[in-house]
Amino acid sequence: MKQVDLLYTGKAKSVYRTDEPGIYIMKFRDDITAFDGEKKDTLSGKGRYNAEVSTFFFRYLEENGIRTHYIRSIEPGTIAVRGLEMIPLEVIVRNVAAGSIVRNYPFKEGEPLDPPVIVIDFKSDTHHDPMLNDDLIYALNLATPEELDQIKATALAINDILREYLDARGITLVDFKLEFGRYNGEILVGDEISMDSMRLWDKETGASLDKDVYRFNKGDVMETYAGVAKRILSPPGESV
Ligand SMILES: Nc1ncnc2c1ncn2[C@@H]1O[C@H](COP(=O)(O)OP(=O)(O)O)[C@@H](O)[C@H]1O
Ligand SMILES: [Mg+2]
């Protein structure tokens, strides 16, 4: 399989067409951004850790019956994926109140959300990712009711799988963001599941193990990403 032309380049990844129809190559770059692109940096090695963790979780989800875009790894930081018609939704599942939900609503940071809360934002840089509701999603023709039901059910199923996996490694899955796309009439999980897209707290210390370390200058971002990648890729009880 050969990489052909650059299809698009986002804030953290670049997507290329290949000479095989329907298969794209996704490169996780070392660029990191926060606050709607206002804070930007390049951190050598970040892309590889995010690709490694995403690859691991996509495989783990497939083993657990969830269909994803992941096909195979090509080299560190680069994976082959099914080319999806992306649905411009950021599907966020929240188990614990943190981040924007605490800023915008009367939740206390660290308050458990049980059952988990799904928040769906419009993935649109020009509109600054406003929160949607079901009616807006239908009015904007972003997804059908059947698709939205499936997206929500899949997001909750993924939450159960990831939460249990991370909990066994001493990590609380506070919240995470998914993106979905259409592929031959199916809805697949796309994009990434990484330290850039999850909010993770150490169960013992409460320390941030994710992009919040970058957002709020809480410590060494690369050391954090390397450590959490190691914990995620290790059996429970090791390297905690
Ligand atoms: N399997 C896929 N097929 C096509 N596009 C994808 C796939 N997975 C993710 N994408 C899109 O590729 C882009 C990934 O790059 P990223 O740097 O995260 O972009 P953004 O700045 O838009 O979040 C996103 O727009 C994402 O929606
Ligand atoms: Mg992105």
Image (tube, rainbow, N blue to C red):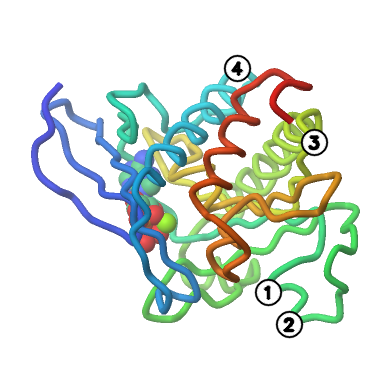
Q: Quadrant of the N terminus?
A: top left
Residue 156 in view here: yes
Which is nearer the eye, 203 or 87? 203
Q: Are marks 1 and 2 in contact (CB under 8 Å)?
A: yes
Q: For residue 215, what is the image quadrant?
A: bottom right
The residue tagged 4 is 63
> Which amino acid, mark 1?
Ser
Q: Are marks 3 and 4 in contact (CB under 8 Å)?
A: no
Q: Earlier in the sequence, mark 3 or mark 4?
A: 4
Residue name at image x 65 percent, y 39 percent: 154
Q: Is residue 166 left or right of residue 75?
A: right
Q: Is residue 202 shown above or below 71?
A: below
Which label sits on residue 104?
2
User: Residue 175: x and y, percent?
Assistant: 70, 54
Does ligand 1 reach within 8 Å of label 2's beta carbon? Answer: no
Q: Earlier in the sequence, mark 2 or mark 3?
A: 2
User: Residue 30: x and y, percent?
Assistant: 34, 51
The residue tagged 1 is 100
Q: Are marks 2 and 3 in contact (CB under 8 Å)?
A: no
The residue tagged 3 is 170
> Which amino acid, mark 4?
Glu
Does ligand 2 reach within 8 Å of label 3's beta carbon? Answer: no
Residue name at image x 53 percent, y 26 percent: 56
User: Residue 235: x and y, percent?
Assistant: 70, 18
Q: Earlier in the sequence, mark 2 or mark 4?
A: 4
Q: Earlier in the sequence, mark 3 or mark 1?
A: 1
> Which amino acid, mark 3?
Gly
Q: Is residue 147 shown above or below 33?
A: above
Quadrant hosting ligand 2: bottom left
Dot 4 crowding, Cα within 10 Å, few <14, some 14–19, many 20+: few
